[in-house]
Image: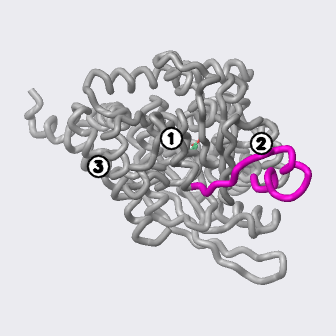
């Protein structure tokens, strides 16, 4: 991603606010405040590599808004991480936490690195080094990080440990998505995929879908993509295409998702499933590019990889009537207009992928209480929130005759607006609120 593209992600993200404003019934001051992040920090992290040389990595943490509670959002390790990208991701987190009504603002962090090139020890040193640099900006009551693209539970455990050492006390609530024995919550691992699955089940009942007739393409087979594919497959949905950063595979009869996930997690690449060797002989699949996967004639398209996948360039060729955004920001605002014009239903990222941060909230609550819930309780509470907010957004969409994304932003803005207005706005202070 070029610097200009990254800068555009943020300005494009902000456009959604303007669009939703007229349906949000709130003070214009709120809109103005939400156009700027509260705090952005850029740090450098010197890391001693295994061969004795020194490398310096760049990292960021943006606390976008904390009107509704401490900042909340993941940390991404990716070669394309940049400050404007992290700002956009932190903005989306702000709206996401408001859409599901959990008491957090929004934040995000990242390090510009290809973690696949680092040894495990180098990765640990980098993770701990990052926490040393951002320690004054995070904390259970200020900003609570979590996993995101190419970070995982073990990395969260290292970060929690480093923070606890700096504070000289154990502080599990500083970060979520930790390993279970270190204070993680049951059900956090598949929560993002499960939240999206609950949204799809809501659509299924509203639209009378027959799972066995539903052909689904999933772009991205990381944590979120794998779990939503697994849950849908278990209900009979046909997962006809999946992809990872190396490319996509397609089979009109659908894949056995558990075996694909097993192969992917063993080999780290989906390609191992269909390249040379015995497994590829048993999986007969056509090879496609990631772009071709998006344009397949399927009933449901699930982008679960990175930002800016559906753009003005390819939106005309998207055939799926329903898109459920499991990735953050996979559709640009120009593409939105094209898809809305064609009547495509887009379940927006800030709702569809909010299951992850919702269970992160449960983890934070459990850490603070020191009392841990069984898995069924986590699932039941997640289900209640996802269904409630899906309903709220869907109703607002129908009531106002707007697209589902605008409805989700309007709902988020109302909630953020209520928190900001509770402290008084210009109308109150100038006495014009009568
Ligand atoms: N990285 C995830 C997201 O984009 C989870 C954030 C969290 O749990 O705080 O929603």
Residue 78 location (% of width, % of height): 62, 63
- In the picture provided, is 296 more to the left or to the right than 177? left
Residue 4 location (% of width, % of height): 40, 70
How crowded pointer 2 is (Cα within 10 Å; few <14, some 14-19, many 20+) is rated as many
Q: Quadrant of ligand 1?
A: top right
Membership of 269 in magenta stretch: no
Judge by depth and name the residue closer to the eye, 432 or 290.
290
Task: Kindly indicate the quadrant of the structure image that contains residue 115.
Answer: bottom right
> Could you tell which of marks 1 and 3 lies nearer the N-terminus?
3
Residue at the disc numbered 1? 325
Task: State the CA–CA distance, disc 3 to disc 2.
Answer: 43 Å
Could you say which disc has been placed on residue 33 in the image? 3
Closer to viewer: mark 1 or mark 3: 1
Judge by depth and name the residue closer to the eye, 206 or 75.
206
Task: State the CA–CA distance, disc 2 to disc 1.
Answer: 20 Å
How crowded pointer 1 is (Cα within 10 Å; few <14, some 14-19, many 20+) is rated as many
Task: State the CA–CA distance, disc 1 to disc 3.
Answer: 26 Å
Closer to viewer: mark 3 or mark 2: 2
Membership of 281 in magenta stretch: yes
Q: Which residues are magenta?
A: 270-290
- Contact, CB < 8 Å: mark 3 with mark 2? no
Residue 302 location (% of width, % of height): 55, 40
- Contact, CB < 8 Å: mark 1 with mark 3? no
Q: Is residue 377 visible?
A: yes
Residue at the disc numbered 2? 261
- Contact, CB < 8 Å: mark 2 with mark 1? no
Which type of secondary structure does the marked residue at label 2 adopt?
A: helix
């Amino acid at each position: 991603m070029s610097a200009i593209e990254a800068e555009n992600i943020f300005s494009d993200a902000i456009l959604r606010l303007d669009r939703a404003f007229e349906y949000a019934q709130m003070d214009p001051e709120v809109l103005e405040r939400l156009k700027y992040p509260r705090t952005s920090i850029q740090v450098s992290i010197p890391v001693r590599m295994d061969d004795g040389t020194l490398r310096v990595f760049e990292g960021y943490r943006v606390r976008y808004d904390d009107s509704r509670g401490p900042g909340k959002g993941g940390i991404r390790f990716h070669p394309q991480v940049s400050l404007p990208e992290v700002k956009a991701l932190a903005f989306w987190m702000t709206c996401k936490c408001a859409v599901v009504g959990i008491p957090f603002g929004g934040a995000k962090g990242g390090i510009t690195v290809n973690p696949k090139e680092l040894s495990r020890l180098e990765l640990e040193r980098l993770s701990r080094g990052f926490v040393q640099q951002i320690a004054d900006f995070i904390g259970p009551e200020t900003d609570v990080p979590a996993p995101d693209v190419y970070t995982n539970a073990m990395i969260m455990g290292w970060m929690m440990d480093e923070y606890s050492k700096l504070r000289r006390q154990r502080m599990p609530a500083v970060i979520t998505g930790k390993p279970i024995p270190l204070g993680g919550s049951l059900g956090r691992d598949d929560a993002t995929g499960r939240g999206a699955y609950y949204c799809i089940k809501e659509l299924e009942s509203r639209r009378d879908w027959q799972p066995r007739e539903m052909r689904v393409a999933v772009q991205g087979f990381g944590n979120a993509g794998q779990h939503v594919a697994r849950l849908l497959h278990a209900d009979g949905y046909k997962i006809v295409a999946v992809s990872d950063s190396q490319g996509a595979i397609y089979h009109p009869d659908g894949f056995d998702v558990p075996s694909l996930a097993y192969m992917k997690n063993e080999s780290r690449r989906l390609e191992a499933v269909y390249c040379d060797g015995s497994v590829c002989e048993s999986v007969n699949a056509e090879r496609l590019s990631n772009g071709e996967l998006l344009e397949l004639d399927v009933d449901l398209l699930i982008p679960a990889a990175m930002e800016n996948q559906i753009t003005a360039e390819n939106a005309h060729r998207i055939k799926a009537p329903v898109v459920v955004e499991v990735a953050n920001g996979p559709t640009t605002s120009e593409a939105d207009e094209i898809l809305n014009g064609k009547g495509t239903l887009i379940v927006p990222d800030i709702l569809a992928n909010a299951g992850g941060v919702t269970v992160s909230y449960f983890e934070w609550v459990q850490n603070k209480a020191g009392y841990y819930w069984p898995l069924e309780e986590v699932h039941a509470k997640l289900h209640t929130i996802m269904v409630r907010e899906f309903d709220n957004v869907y109703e607002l969409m129908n009531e106002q005759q707007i697209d589902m994304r605008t409805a989700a932003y309007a709902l988020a803005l109302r909630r953020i607006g209520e928190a900001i207005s509770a402290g008084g706005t210009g109308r109150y202070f100038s006495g014009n609120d009568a």
